[in-house]
């Protein structure tokens, strides 16, 4: 059995990729709000978290290396996909966990992949790994294919507020100020290294969705692409963006998903994260 492991910013639940040949383990991130711990697990109430976050200081914490080591110990072959390393210490924690697990059993095969993304980008990588394993591809070949696939994925997003990204040092303060003072929607993207840069600006909902579609056209050939739109309490916006994408681009599919805790923390209410 292939042991798939990810942190909770993948926005997947374990049961979504668990079967006879593949098992997914999702290790929760932690959100600290007003001295209260919110584990990003199956019991997290996103609405409660967002309401608490609006009233008090907050921060996030990545899983420990031991949590990853324990997960790696469950099977002989493990593939781990983490949130982008410039956004979190999770990738390094997973690498350290790999070293701990191999010290116990050097015969294990463990591959840790920095997604250079989050949310839907991670989900696409995990699904690709499962499909390749179920098709009978060798472990080493799967790792090579995943790396190439990762390099061809793109992530962009537009948020109603960039407060938490700026507060955590993930984005320059000027971007958040621009959004709040001028009413401009900023379209941001993940760079090839996995950090955040501004890709465009638009005023108004319709123009924002069109700007995202134009960014998709510029960034890669989207013919046959699988697209995931993750939303934080903004299903209406996600559906409208999906309609724009399907009208303008020859993609294979557009899936809408709800953010879990960590992605909801950074997206904040109304945010949309796009992976393709």
Image: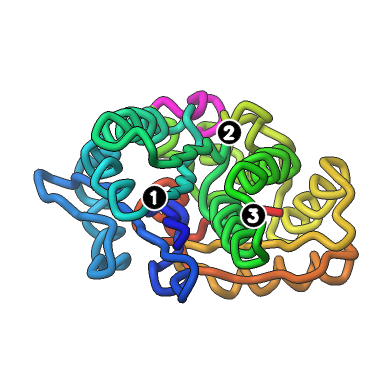
Which residue is labeled 2 in the image?
178
Q: Earlier in the sequence, mark 1 or mark 3?
A: 1
What residue appears at the point 38 percent right and 38 percent down from the top-left corner? Answer: 107
What mark, if any, has residue 191 been given in the picture?
A: none
- Left or right of 172? Residue 32 is left
Q: Label 2 neighbourhood size at 10 Å, few (<14), some (14-19), many (20+)?
A: some
- Left or right of 221? Residue 197 is left
Task: Name the spot of residue 194 as percent of width and height, x first.
Answer: 58, 31
Which residue is labeled 3 in the image?
274
Task: Name the spot of residue 51 as percent of width and height, x first.
Answer: 26, 60
Query: Looking at the image, can residue 237 be seen?
Result: yes
The stretch in magenta equals: 169-176
Q: Quadrant of residue 193?
A: top right
Q: How far apart in space, not on screen, are marks 1 and 3 (Cα)?
A: 33 Å
Q: Tag 3, which secondary structure?
A: strand
Foreground mark, 3 or 2, reads: 3
What residue appears at the point 48 percent right and 47 percent down from the top-left corner? Answer: 79
Q: Earlier in the sequence, mark 2 or mark 1?
A: 1
């Amino acid at each position: 059995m292939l042991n798939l492991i990810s942190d909770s910013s993948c926005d997947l639940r374990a049961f979504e990729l668990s079967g006879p040949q593949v098992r997914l383990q999702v290790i929760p991130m932690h959100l600290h709000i007003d001295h209260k711990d919110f584990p990003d697990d199956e019991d997290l109430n996103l609405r409660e978290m967002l309401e608490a976050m609006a009233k008090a200081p907050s921060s996030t914490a990545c899983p420990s290396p031991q949590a990853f080591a324990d997960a790696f110990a469950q099977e002989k072959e493990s593939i781990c996909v983490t949130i982008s390393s410039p956004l979190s210490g999770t990738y390094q924690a997973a690498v350290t966990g790999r070293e701990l697990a191999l010290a116990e059993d050097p015969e294990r095969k463990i591959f840790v992949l920095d997604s250079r993304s989050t949310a839907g980008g991670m989900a696409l990588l995990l699904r690709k790994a499962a499909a390749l394993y179920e098709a009978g591809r060798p472990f080493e070949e799967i790792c090579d294919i995943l790396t190439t696939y990762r390099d061809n994925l793109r992530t962009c997003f537009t948020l109603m507020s960039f407060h938490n990204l700026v507060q955590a040092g993930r984005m320059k303060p000027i971007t958040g100020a621009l959004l709040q003072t001028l009413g401009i929607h900023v379209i941001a993207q993940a760079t090839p290294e996995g950090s955040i840069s501004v890709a465009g600006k638009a005023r108004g909902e319709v123009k924002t969705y069109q700007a995202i579609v134009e960014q998709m056209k510029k960034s890669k050939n989207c013919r046959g692409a699988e697209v995931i739109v993750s939303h934080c309490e903004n299903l209406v916006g996600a559906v409208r963006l999906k309609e724009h994408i399907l009208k303008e681009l020859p993609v294979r599919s557009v899936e809408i998903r709800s953010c879990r805790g960590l992605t909801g923390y950074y997206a904040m209410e109304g945010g949309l994260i796009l992976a393709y």
